[in-house]
Structures are given as structure tokens and as C-alpha cells.
Image (cartoon, rainbow, N blue to C red):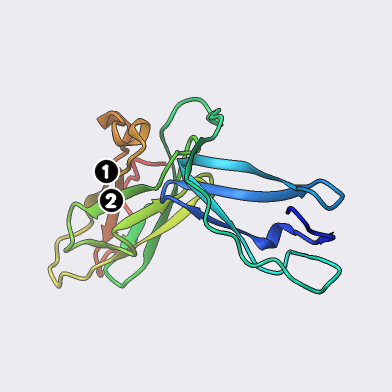
């Protein structure tokens, strides 16, 4: 800010351009006088490139001349100091209700991550028998900011019009798609097979439930 008489730079005047796997949650501006300001970027998640640009009219002189917007700065590489929260990367399943019926009754389960990932984590889901149970979604997507929020999946029973009694089926998950290798390379045993049972229209009492 050479030649400026007044500087009014605020955090909202700092525009960031970041690459896909980088999140910067906080911008702060410090300094006083009419010479310079220090811009700090903190609460960083992930890793990538960032460049900054300053909006116009953040400084002026006694003659009423306002500073124009700055040119975009060269990109610099930044990376969080990464301390996973939790033990090791993994998936946490919680079965809320694993029974469905051919009348359309639903069951539910939730999934969340055990540690904060460095990038998006996409978890595919599927039913082992679409004639017995269907899912409310075929994928769950976790980010570095919502990784520990349990996401709910609803399983709805399907009427196959056959008198087949109660039929067991499984909800399968994985493998994960992610650029975070700690999640991309999770071992097979990390993916839980959740057993559901679909009660036939004519049955009133559920059978033995292996999940209870």
C-alpha cells in the first residue's frame, strides 16, 4: 500500500482461489498505520494450491483516489498439519432397524467416518437383492468438514408378489472412491455387510433377528 493515507482492508476483501482438495476456513488481517497489512490463512483442511486477490477500494489517499483491485498473486502450496481425530481411518456403522416388510415398511442404518479425511470420500452402497429391499441412496459422500456426521440410509421392503416367507438380504458397501489413500485403500474387512430381513405380506411375526 505504498502512498496510501488510509487503509481499510477487511477479511471479506481478500478473495481466494484454491484447488479442489483444499479448504481454508478463516482469513484474518492484522497491522496498523498506512504502510502494510498481514493476511493470515488459518483453519486449513487438506492440501493444494492457493492464490489471493485483493478487492478494489481497500485503500485511499487524501485526494480521494482509491486503490484498484490487485493482480492475482502467484499460487503457493499449503498443507494442513494433519492430526487424525480418532484411532485409524475406517467406517462406523449403526443399525437402527434392520427389518422391512413387503407392505413397504422401512429399516434404517447410519454411516460416518472414524477420522477426518484429506479429501472427498465416496462410499457406494447396494442391496444384494433388489427384489426384497431397495436403498434410499446408492452413495454416501463425506467431506473433510462433515466426516463425523452420521448419514442415514433408509431401506424399503419390496413386494415380490410371491409367498416366499421372510427373506434375508444384505446391504453391501464399498470400495471407497477417494484421492485420500488412507480411505481409498481400506481393507475389505472395514466394509460391514448389514443383514436385513423382509417380512412377507402374510407373516405377522418376524423371525429370529441375527443383528439383535
Residue at the image position 40 percent from the left and 47 percent from the top? 120
User: Which quadrant of the structure image shows residue 178?
Assistant: top left
Mark 2 sits on what residue?
124
Q: Position of residue 3 (x, y in %)?
A: 77, 56
From the top left corner, tell me how far across and down residue 104 is, in percent: 32, 71
Number of residues whose C-alpha sits closer than 10 Å to that of mark 2, classed few (under 14), some (14–19) or many (20 or more): some
Residue 19 vs residue 37: left or right? left
The residue under the point 41% across, 33% down is 90
In the displayed structure image, the side of residue 128 where residue 146 appears, left or right: right
Residues 18 and 102: in front is 18
Q: Quadrant of residue 63?
A: bottom right
User: Judging from the image, what secondary structure is the residue with disc 2 in?
Assistant: strand
Q: Secondary structure at mark 1?
A: loop
Task: From this view, report whether residue 73 is shown above or below residue 45.
Answer: below
The one nearer the camera, 141 or 38, is 38
Residue 189 visible from this viewpoint = yes
Please name whichever residue, 72 or 85, is drawn nearer the observer in this view of the structure.
72
Q: CA distance from mark 1 to mark 2?
A: 5 Å
Q: Pick the quarter of the image with the N terminus.
A: bottom right
User: Which mark, by number, is residue 26?
Assistant: none
Taking 182 as reference, is 125 above or below it? below
- Residue at mark 1: 174
Q: Front-most of 43 and 204?
A: 43
Q: Is residue 126 left or right of residue 143?
A: left
Q: Quadrant of the C terminus?
A: top left
**Residue 26, above or below 192:** below
The percent position of residue 163, horizontal first and vertical second, equals: 14, 66
Mark toward the start of the polypeptide (1 vs 2): 2
| Residue 97 in sight here | no
**Pointer 1 with pointer 2, Cβ within 8 A:** yes
Q: Residue at x 51, y 50 (%)?
A: 51
Amino acid at each position: 500500500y505504498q502512498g496510501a493515507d488510509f487503509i481499510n482492508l477487511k477479511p471479506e476483501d481478500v478473495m481466494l482461489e484454491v484447488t479442489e482438495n483444499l479448504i481454508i476456513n478463516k482469513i484474518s488481517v492484522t497491522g496498523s498505520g498506512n504502510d502494510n497489512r498481514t493476511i493470515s490463512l488459518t483453519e486449513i483442511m487438506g492440501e493444494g494450491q492457493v492464490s489471493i486477490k485483493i478487492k478494489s477500494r481497500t485503500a485511499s489517499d487524501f485526494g480521494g483516489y482509491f486503490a484498484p483491485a490487485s493482480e492475482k498473486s502467484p499460487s503457493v502450496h499449503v498443507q494442513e498439519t494433519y492430526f487424525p481425530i480418532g484411532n485409524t481411518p475406517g467406517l462406523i456403522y449403526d443399525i437402527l432397524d434392520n427389518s422391512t416388510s413387503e407392505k413397504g415398511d422401512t429399516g434404517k442404518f447410519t454411516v460416518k467416518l472414524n477420522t477426518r479425511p484429506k479429501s472427498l470420500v465416496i462410499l457406494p452402497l447396494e442391496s444384494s437383492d433388489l427384489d426384497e429391499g431397495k436403498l434410499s441412496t446408492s452413495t454416501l459422500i463425506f467431506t473433510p468438514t462433515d466426516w463425523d456426521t452420521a448419514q442415514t440410509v433408509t431401506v424399503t421392503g419390496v413386494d415380490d408378489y410371491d409367498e416366499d416367507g421372510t427373506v434375508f438380504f444384505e446391504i453391501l458397501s464399498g470400495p471407497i472412491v477417494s484421492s485420500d489413500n488412507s480411505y481409498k485403500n481400506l481393507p475389505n474387512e472395514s466394509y460391514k455387510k448389514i443383514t436385513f430381513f423382509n417380512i412377507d405380506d402374510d407373516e405377522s411375526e418376524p423371525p429370529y433377528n441375527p443383528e439383535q
